[in-house]
Image (tube, rainbow, N blue to C red):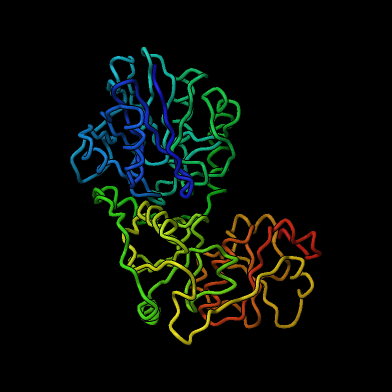
Amino acid sequence: MFFIETIELAGLGNRSYLAGGERTAVAVDPPRDVDQVLTAAARRGVRIAYVVETHVHNDYVSGGLELARLTGASYLVPGEARVRFAHTPVRDGDTVTVDAGARLTLRAMATPGHTPHHTSYVLQEDQAAVAVFTGGSLLIGTVGRPDLVEPRLTERLARAQHASAHRLAAELPDSTAVLPTHGFGSFCSSSQVAGGGTTIGRERTANDALTQDVDTFVAGLLANLDDIPAYYAHMGPANAAGPAAVDLTPPAMADPDEIAARLAAGEWVVDLRNRVAFAEGHVAGSFNFEAEGKLATHLAWMVPWGKPVTLLAESPGQLAEAQRELVRVGIDRPAAAATGGPADWLRPGETPASFPRATFADLAERHPGKGIVVLDVRRDSERAGGHVEGSVHIPVHLLHRRLDEVPDGQVWVHCAGGMRAAVAASLLDAAGRDVVAVDDTFEAAEKAGLTVRTV
């Protein structure tokens, strides 16, 4: 008998896996905070004998090196990957025994496309394939994007993705479970497709890489690629160098004077509370990134790399979870932190800043109107599906560098659901703009009477 345990990284839209028998196991694409992998292994009473990487990751810092160090496991990395740490290089066809008692083996299968060196791993029981860890190759209904390595390689890698998908489908039984790392909200996925699990047989009939000819597939894949989070540029080099161990101990606590001083120095002070609480009252100049709203992706995408970050949380638990999210993308230590609320973070005599929230129905009563600016902070691909007539478009991840492009007037800022609008509203509020955060779903815009255009 064997087991496969999934370790969800919902904030980044990824999954890691622990698979094994009664005594030993393999960890696949582990996250930076390896304690949860160790906990899963301890709960099952198994020793981690192997740690494997499907590729050098571009979207998060790997915990593979640290996990191998802590457990004594062999660290398997694709042989063509350029890394600067001790490891066991893996090449196509290499096989290792995961658990002898369970007759469980792992076979490497070269599947280039997401990266040139990408490798999938076939889990075999009695030499029969039962699952395949596909990393950023074959995903649920799609494939990993091919444009994260080098622009000149993108089309070549897109064609390689098509070939790799067909190799997987040709060599593995339809019943083989497909267990990707990306594709659950990750920007490493070439498109977002719903679904929790799949098989080779299901993908054979539903995945564009397996139902379209190579030219049609590549043209569609390249046409639909979305923006790349800015922090991705730092993840590959960090993983190739060998990430340092994680320090999740609480950061130094800041009093109101220190918070004010850090703001005055141009550092980022990030309020992790929900957007309703932030709009009602916050430290002037702070930015709102909800702890439950893909914190790591959006904060790491927007903050100037290396800029000191102070975290304001409503509780020690919220602070600890935010630290865990952020180390996964290389923001290792907050410069400082504070817990509580604005009353705890403001100096005597200071009052909280605030701004109003509204719906699209509220906006429809004012727009178009003199002095009203509608700012759409969704991504280009979202706006292409429809936008409010007369709105200005600046994606939220670019707004902090383009604030001077927002026209004069009261700014009503919206996104698709409210969370990114809150981030944008906090940036505008910190810059001294008169802002209203539209906390509503975009589907409500046309129903409210606003004119929505698709061109």
| Left or right: 106 in relation to 377 | left
Residue at 35% across / 78% down in the picture?
258
The residue sitting at 43% across, 83% down in the picture is: 347
The answer to whether residue 160 shows anywhere in this view is no
Q: Position of residue 362 (x, y in %)?
A: 75, 70
Quarter of the image with the N terminus in it: top left
The image shows residue 37, relative to residue 32, as above or below, that is: above
* Direction from residue 158 to residue 429 in the image, left or right: right
**Which of 202 and 416 lies nearest the eye of the viewer?**
416
- Residue 296 percent coordinates (x, y): 44, 56
- Front residue of 72 and 199: 72
* Image x and y of residue 219, in percent: 56, 43
Query: Along the line of sight, which residue is nearer the eye, 27 or 250?
Result: 250
- Toward the bottom, the furthest residue is 349
Q: Horizontal and vertical percent for residue 254?
A: 35, 72
Residue at image position (30%, 27%) is: 46
Examine the rendered structure and indicate whether residue 235 appears above or below residue 2: below
Whether residue 100 is visible, yes or no, is yes
